[in-house]
Amino acid sequence: MIAGILTFIWPAITGLVLLYLIAARAVVTGIIEIIATIQLREEIDNELWLALSGVASALC
């Protein structure tokens, strides 16, 4: 309820916080994909694509 009230009071700051949360999630997901690629290197085929998707996610 408090978050909803703050959204109506400060919509610009709420949008900025949401942008930072989405960006942080993308970076963390990319790092996890890169770590998974390193750990699963011998288990999967074409691990390059998983690594590239992790790098792209972390950079975007």
Image: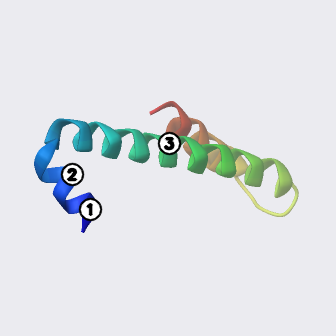
Q: Going by the image, does 42 lie left or right of 18? A: right
Relative image position of residue 25 (x, y in whole percent): 50, 49
How far is mark 1 from mark 3, CA to CA? 23 Å
Quarter of the image holding residue 14? top left
Instruction: Identify the mark at residue 24; answer none if there is no mark.
Output: 3
* Residue type, numbered disc 2: Leu
* Residue type, numbered disc 3: Ala
Q: Considering the image in quadrants, where does the N terminus appear? A: bottom left
Q: Count all numbered tags in the image, as a single digit.
A: 3
* Residue type, numbered disc 1: Ile
Q: 3 or 37, which is in the foreground?
A: 3
Instruction: Say above or below: 56 vs 37.
Output: above
Report which residue position mark 2 lands on.
6
Q: Which circle, 1 or 3, is nearer the viewer? A: 1
The answer to whether the residue labelled 2 contacts the one labelled 1, judged by CB atoms less than 8 Å apart, is: yes
Q: Going by the image, does 52 lie left or right of 46? A: left
How far is mark 2 from mark 1, CA to CA? 6 Å
- Look at the numbered disc 2 and give the secondary structure of its residue: helix
Report which residue position mark 1 lands on.
2
- Look at the numbered disc 3 and give the secondary structure of its residue: helix
Quarter of the image holding residue 3? bottom left
Q: 6 or 41, which is in the foreground?
A: 6
Relative image position of residue 21 (x, y in whole percent): 42, 46
The answer to whether the residue labelled 2 contacts the one labelled 3, judged by CB atoms less than 8 Å apart, is: no
